Image (cartoon, grey):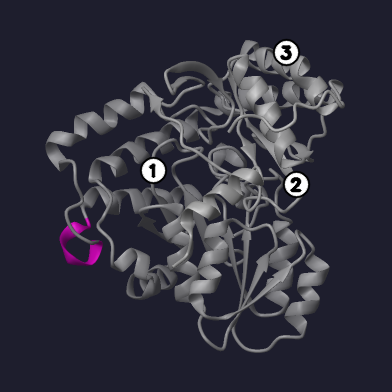
Amino acid sequence: MRDFAQEIEQRKLAGLYRSRRLVSGPQQPTLVADGKALLSFCSNDYLGLANNPEIIGAMTSSLPDVGVGGAASHLVCGHHEAHHHLEQRLAMFTGRSAALFFSTGYMANLGVISALAGRGDTVFSDRLNHASIIDGCILSRAKVRRYPHGDVAALEAMLAATSGHKLVVTDGVFSMDGDIAPLRELARVCRCHDALLVVDDAHGLGVLGPQGRGSVAEAGLSEEEVPVLVGTLGKGIGTSGAFVAGSEVLIDYLVQKARTYIYTTAMPPALAVATCASLDVVERDGQRRSHLEGLIRKFRAGAQALGYELMPSRTPIQPIMIGDNWAALALSQSLEAQGVLVTAIRPPTVPEGEARLRVTLSAGHSERDVDLLLQALAKSRPILSGGGAGKPAI
């Protein structure tokens, strides 16, 4: 029998142990975690909609009519008209023919990839893709080939040397680096080599593109150029769940084949109502995105002036590269002691030797909030300049 306690201790010794925080109250920039008020810069609520009164009102007012539970899978009796309306709304929002609502982004990627590829097929996956994509590739039982991050030339050579059914899968915005995939070039090589392109735009929706329609829309790519578009709703959209959008034939095929859609209870219909209300806010409120862009510029200028190493990102994901696990933990704990919450991201979430602080900005933050973050980073800078905090408490 495996010694689970020993494995946990080994993680602690390597600076890889993780623990959960107990959050009280709603998700917002100033939150209470473990009983302490903190200014948070680690949420994916990019537009500050998770506690939006209009969206809360839409959800609560629908409860007497739709109830609190999905009660059954979609293919039994759980497919409520609220779910159906959301799918139509998501298709319009993304400029696709149809859409399918999943419970989570993880389940969407598992279901989509394993349905679209199988034994005898080949899946090409960007080396920095999210864990849900990696696991979807494994679950498909297809041959998986990882191409260097964002390297279209390397991918094209791999595609040219491969026959049979080919699937290329990439994040639109990479969750730990914050950079954007070369989508137009990926679409081109996929067309040239008869490969099906799947883009997971979890971190682009709401933030990038016209009216927040995402990285694929920003790149001007049609349904024909990106046949499979996956998105999550718990980040920029501020609610929960996920979807895949594409042709009507694709969606019908996934209804028949995607096991994570077929064999799970439908999400609460009230959540679908809330998400439709959120999409309305996202489309009409360009000021949120403009404010967020200003905060990103302000943070980057300030952090770089302090000598921090930032990654090349123009999205709300602004990682500070540290390298060492313990140094990342020490910096995170120093910020928290000053009332600022930024979590340290360590392997296996990121490659070995690339531990970092993943700063995420939200339209819910003010310029004053960013000033407070920069002030805390300035006071903590000696930790990375040989002032060496050693191994912090876990």
The residue that disc 1 covers is 240
Question: Rounded to the nearest whole Å, what is the CA distance between mark 3 and mark 2?
Answer: 24 Å
Which is closer to the viewer, label 1 or label 2? 2
The answer to which quarter of the image holds residue 280 is: top left
Mark 1 or mark 2, earlier in chain:
1
Instruction: Write the start and end of the magenta stretch as one range.
Output: 74-79
Left or right of 1 in this view: 387? right
The residue that disc 2 covers is 354
Element assignment for label 2: loop
Provide residue 384's location: percent of width, then percent of height.
82, 28
Is the residue under label 3 in contact with that under label 1 (CB below 8 Å)?
A: no
Give the number of marks: 3
The residue at 39%/75% (across/down) is: 253
Residue placed most toward the observer, 355 or 2: 2
The residue that disc 3 covers is 375
290 above or below 86? above
Q: Is residue 75 magenta?
A: yes
Q: Is residue 308 magenta?
A: no
Marker disc for residue 206: none
Residue placed most toward the observer, 161 or 284: 161
The residue at 30%/68% (across/down) is: 262
Is the residue under label 2 in contact with that under label 3 (CB below 8 Å)?
A: no
Which class describes the residues within 10 Å of circle 3: few (<14), some (14-19), or many (20+)?
some
Please, which residue is most extreme toward the left here?
64
The answer to which quarter of the image holds residue 126 is: bottom right
